[in-house]
Image (cartoon, grey):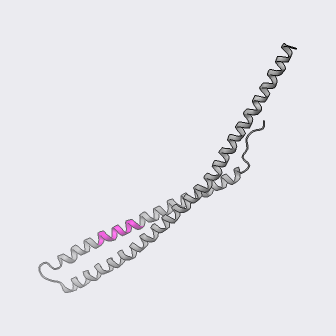
Amino acid sequence: MKKFSFRLERVLRFKAQIEEQKKLLLGERNVILNKEKNLLAGLFDKKTRYMEIYSSLFQGKIDIRGLKSAHSYVNKVKEDISTQGRQVVKAEKHVEDAKIEVRDSMRDRKKYDNLKTRKHKEYDFDAGKAEQKEIDEIASRTWKRIFP
């Protein structure tokens, strides 16, 4: 009996390549998300530092120009936090989309994988039957030679 070959092997390899590409894209999007989150955390730290500076300006002699400057900078950092928060939400959406794409491509590849497994089992079953038939023929010929 000839060697097993899956006639959709090229399709299976193609589906596996697509899945790998989707996984790489997911990884890239996770890296971007982490960078965006780190930027947001840095902005929160910056806001905390400037709030402390702003609060310290109320101690002792009040510097109106310094208060105004610090207040406007705190407001600017708050705007930056808001903008960065939207960037994080956008990056999270991209990650979720990539996860869905990976899941779909895995499911698609798995269909062909299961088909290949099923076809290989059928091949093994047929090969076993053919081998058994050959053994039976050999035994039959031997029996006829011994007991004519």
User: As displayed, is residue 83 above or below residue 139?
Assistant: below
Q: Residue furthest left?
A: 60
Question: Which residue occupies 65% across, 44% down?
Answer: 117
Q: In what quadrant of the picture does the N terminus appear?
A: top right
Farthest front residue in view = 148
Q: Which residues are magenta?
A: 36-46
Q: What percent of the width, then of the height, locates residue 120?
A: 69, 42
Any magenta on residue 41? yes
The quadrant in which residue 62 appears is: bottom left
Q: Is residue 50 above or below residue 67?
A: above
Question: Which residue is at the front of the view, 124 or 39?
Answer: 124
At horizontal 41% and vertical 74% (from top left) the residue drawn is: 86
Q: Residue 129: x, y in percent? A: 75, 33
How many numbered callouts? Answer: 0
Q: Tell me where residue 93 appears, x and y as whole percent.
A: 47, 68
Between 56 and 44, the one lying in front of the other is 44
Q: Nearer the viewer, residue 100 or 146?
A: 146
Q: Predominant secondary structure in magenta?
A: helix
- Determine which quarter of the picture holds residue 19: bottom right
Going 81% across and 23% down the picture, which residue do you hit? 138
Residue 78 part of the magenta-drawn span: no
Please name whichever residue, 126 or 35, is drawn nearer the observer in this view of the structure: 126
Where's the C terminus, which quadrant?
top right
Which residue lies at the image location 61% right of the left edge and 52% below the top edge? 110
Would you say 146 lies left or right of 26 here? right
Image coords of residue 125 (percent x, y): 71, 37
Instruction: Specify whether 49 is left or right of 79.
Output: left
